[in-house]
């Protein structure tokens, strides 16, 4: 009797802690819930040409994860809508300058640079905007930051990543372990975001992130 009981209990736990679950929402599409033994918090990832992915800590049930998604429904719908616009641009040859109100983009990006610089104690000499085919951003030896005006077409969290990356180069001019160690102190998921940005690079080779 005991052996049967424990087998059933084990099977029940296995079902509760299954690794993946797929659901679908109107206006969002496919959502993939993926369990992670390393994750500490629920995390939603919206990437081009991929289903929405929700990382679920081991001790959180999928039912709880779906409740979390419900709380974030409006935000998620807006993110998916914006991502679809990006997908369309990438599918038709990328983001062109004609798609961008340059003055509005400059104001938006300048405000964000100044906010993040003030928040984390960075200083820079000047801010330059270009329409570049090879970089999202760069930082000179004299701490002059250059940003690609097309950044405004990326998701907000990736815009912040690029800006913080270049601001970090005002302190460390290379991509050494010191750079990533200091960067991770202010942005713990920096390397994950770098990989996400690389997804845009692979989808559209006109945009390469290679900060100086």
Image: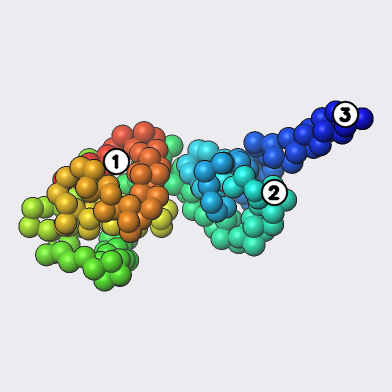
Please name the residue shown 33% across and 59% down the image.
186
Q: Which residue is mark 3?
A: 4
Please name the residue shown 23% across and 43% down the image.
177
Give how far apart the Cα atoms at labels 3 and 2 are. 25 Å
Q: Earlier in the sequence, mark 3 or mark 1?
A: 3
**Residue 55 vs residue 50, the one in the foreground:** 55
Label 1 near label 3: C-beta < 8 Å? no
Residue 37 position, x and y percent, is: 56, 41
Residue 7 position, x and y percent, is: 82, 30
Furthest-right residue in view?
Answer: 1
**Residue 109 vs residue 95, the one in the foreground:** 109
Tell me the colour scheme of the image. rainbow
Mark on residue 61?
2
**Residue 32 vs residue 35, the one in the foreground:** 35
**What is the quadrant of the C terminus in the image?**
top left
**What is the quadrant of the N terminus in the image?**
top right
Residue 144 position, x and y percent, is: 12, 58
Give how far apart the Cα atoms at labels 2 and 1 are. 39 Å
Furthest-left residue in view?
Answer: 142
Mark on residue 141?
none
Mark on residue 207?
1
Element under disc 3: helix
- Residue 168: tell me if it is visible: yes
Element under disc 1: loop
**Left or right placement of residue 150 versus residue 167 in this view:** right
Looking at the rendered image, the disc whose residue lies closer to the viewer, 2 or 1, is 2
């Amino acid at each position: 009797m005991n052996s049967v009981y424990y087998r059933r209990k084990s099977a029940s736990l296995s079902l509760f802690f299954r690794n993946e679950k797929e659901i679908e929402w109107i206006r969002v599409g496919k959502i993939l819930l993926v369990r992670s033994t390393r994750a500490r918090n629920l995390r939603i990832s919206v990437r081009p040409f991929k289903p929405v992915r929700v990382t679920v800590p081991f001790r959180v049930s999928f039912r709880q994860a779906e409740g979390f998604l419900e709380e974030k429904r409006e935000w998620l719908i807006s993110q998916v809508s914006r991502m679809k616009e990006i997908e369309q641009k990438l599918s038709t040859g990328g983001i062109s300058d004609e798609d961008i109100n340059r003055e509005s983009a400059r104001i938006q990006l300048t405000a964000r640079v100044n906010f993040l610089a003030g928040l984390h104690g960075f200083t820079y000499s000047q801010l330059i905007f270009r329409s570049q085919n090879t970089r999202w951003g760069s930082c000179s030896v004299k701490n002059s930051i250059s940003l690609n005006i097309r950044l405004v077409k990326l998701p907000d969290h990736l815009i912040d990543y690029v800006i913080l990356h270049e601001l970090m180069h005002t302190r460390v001019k290379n991509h050494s372990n010191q750079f990533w160690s200091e960067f991770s102190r202010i942005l713990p998921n920096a390397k994950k975001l770098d990989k996400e940005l690389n997804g845009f690079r692979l989808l559209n080779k006109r945009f390469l992130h290679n900060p100086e």
